[in-house]
Image (cartoon, helix red, strand yellow):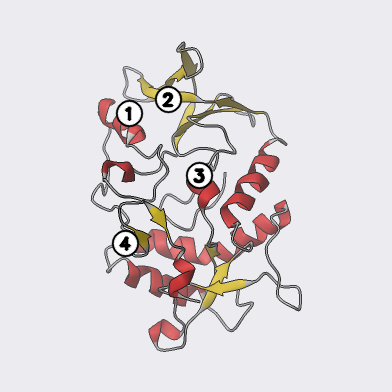
C-alpha cells in the first residue's frame, strides 16, 4: 500500500496499473493484484514527472497547515477537508517512508530531499512567497515510485496477475463483496478470485473526453464494476482538468512549469 497525495483515497492504493483489483485472500500478507497492463507499462504513475507534495521544510520553513490551506483553496473549497487535513499532515512521514524504501529522491547540497516549486503552492496561508514543497526524483518521480514500491511488494506474498482485466465484483447475498471476476487478456479465459477483502484502485475516466492526458486505460471500467454491483459512487463530477495540457494531442506539460 502507498499513500497518494493527489486524491482523497490516499489510504490504500496500488501503482501497478490504472485499472486493477487488489484482492486480499488470507489474513496474512497474501494478495492477488489483477492488472490491466504490465506493471512497468506507461500508465499514470509511470508517466508522472513532477513529484509529491509534502511539507518537509527542506528548502524553507514550511507547515502542513499551509499545504492543507493550498489544497482546500485549490479545490475551490469543495474538497473533503477531513481527508485533506489527514493527507497533508501525514505526507512528510510518507515521503520519508518512501525514501527509506529506497526511492532515489534528488538531493540538495546538504543532502536533504530536494523540493521544487509547483503551481498553487504558497506559504503562510497564502500571504507568503511561493512554496518549494514538491519532493522530486529529477523528472522521473512516478517511474521511481513505481519501481521502488514494486520492489518492496516482492517482500510479501503478493501475486501479480499481469494483464488480467477485472470485469465484475462477486457480490454475496448479504451485500458483501466476495471477490472479483477477471479475464486473461492473453487467451480470453475468465478467472474467479474469492477474497475476504477487495480494494479497488481504478483511477478515473478521463478517456471519456476527446482530448486528455490520462492513460489510455482510464475508461471508467472500475466505476462500472461498482455501479453494476449496485454500490454507491461518490463525487463523479470531480474530474481534473489539467491547465497545462496540449489540446488535441493529449500531451501533458508538467505542473512544474507553473511554479518554476
Secondary structure found at label 3: loop
Residue tagged 4? 79
Residue 167 visible somewhere in the drawing: yes
Would you say the residues marked 2 and 3 are in contact, meaning their CB atoms lie under 8 Å apart?
no
Q: Is there CB contact under 8 Å for labels 1 and 2?
A: yes
Residue 29 point in image, percent of width and height: 64, 32
The disc at residue 166 is 2
Q: According to the image, label 3 marks what residue?
A: 12
Q: CA distance from mark 1 to mark 3?
A: 19 Å
Which percent across, then down, holds residue 254?
A: 46, 63
Calculate the distance from the C-alpha at mark 2 to the C-alpha at mark 4.
Answer: 29 Å
The residue lying toward the viewer, choosing from 28 and 119, is 119
Residue position for label 1: 225
Crowd around label 2: few <14 · some 14–19 · many ≥20 (10 Å): many
Measured in 3D between alpha carbons, the distance from the residue under mark 4 to the one under mark 3, in whole angstroms, is: 19 Å
**Residue displayed at 50% across by 43% down:** 13
Q: Residue, x 46% and y 14% (percent of image)? A: 192
Q: Going by the image, does 87 lie left or right of 98?
A: left
Identified at 71% across, 58% down, the residue is: 104
The image position of residue 210, as x and y in percent, is 26, 45
| Picture quarter with the N terminus | top right
- Disc 1 from disc 2: Cα separation: 8 Å
Residue at image coords 36%, 51%: 250
Could you give the CA–CA distance between mark 1 and mark 4, rounded to whole angstroms?
Answer: 25 Å
Q: Earlier in the sequence, mark 1 or mark 3?
A: 3
Query: Is 157 in front, or is 182?
Result: 182
Q: Nearer the viewer, mark 1 or mark 4?
A: 1
Amino acid at each position: 500500500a502507498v499513500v497518494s497525495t493527489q486524491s482523497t483515497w490516499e489510504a490504500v492504493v496500488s501503482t501497478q496499473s490504472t485499472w486493477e483489483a487488489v484482492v486480499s485472500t488470507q489474513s496474512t500478507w497474501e494478495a492477488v493484484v489483477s492488472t490491466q497492463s504490465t506493471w512497468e507499462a506507461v500508465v499514470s504513475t509511470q508517466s508522472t514527472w513532477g513529484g509529491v507534495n509534502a511539507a518537509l521544510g527542506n528548502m524553507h520553513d514550511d507547515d502542513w497547515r499551509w499545504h492543507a490551506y493550498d489544497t482546500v483553496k485549490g479545490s475551490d473549497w469543495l474538497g473533503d477537508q477531513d481527508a485533506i487535513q489527514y493527507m497533508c499532515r501525514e505526507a512528510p512521514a510518507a515521503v520519508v517512508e518512501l525514501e527509506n524504501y529506497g526511492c532515489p529522491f534528488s538531493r540538495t547540497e546538504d543532502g536533504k530531499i530536494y523540493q521544487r516549486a509547483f503551481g498553487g503552492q504558497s506559504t503562510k496561508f497564502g500571504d507568503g512567497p511561493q512554496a518549494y514543497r514538491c519532493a522530486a526524483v529529477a523528472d522521473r518521480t512516478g517511474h521511481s515510485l513505481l519501481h521502488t514500491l514494486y520492489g518492496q511488494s516482492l517482500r510479501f506474498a503478493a501475486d501479480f496477475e499481469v494483464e488480467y482485466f477485472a470485469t465484475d465484483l462477486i457480490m454475496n447475498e448479504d451485500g458483501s463483496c466476495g471477490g472479483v471476476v477477471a479475464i486473461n487478456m492473453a487467451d480470453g479465459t475468465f478467472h474467479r478470485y474469492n477474497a475476504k477483502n477487495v480494494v479497488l484502485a481504478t483511477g478515473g475516466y478521463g478517456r471519456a473526453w476527446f482530448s486528455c492526458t490520462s492513460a489510455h486505460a482510464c475508461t471508467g471500467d472500475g466505476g462500472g464494476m461498482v455501479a453494476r454491483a449496485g454500490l454507491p459512487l461518490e463525487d463523479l463530477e470531480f474530474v481534473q482538468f489539467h491547465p497545462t495540457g496540449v489540446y488535441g494531442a493529449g500531451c501533458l506539460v508538467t505542473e512544474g512549469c507553473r511554479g518554476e
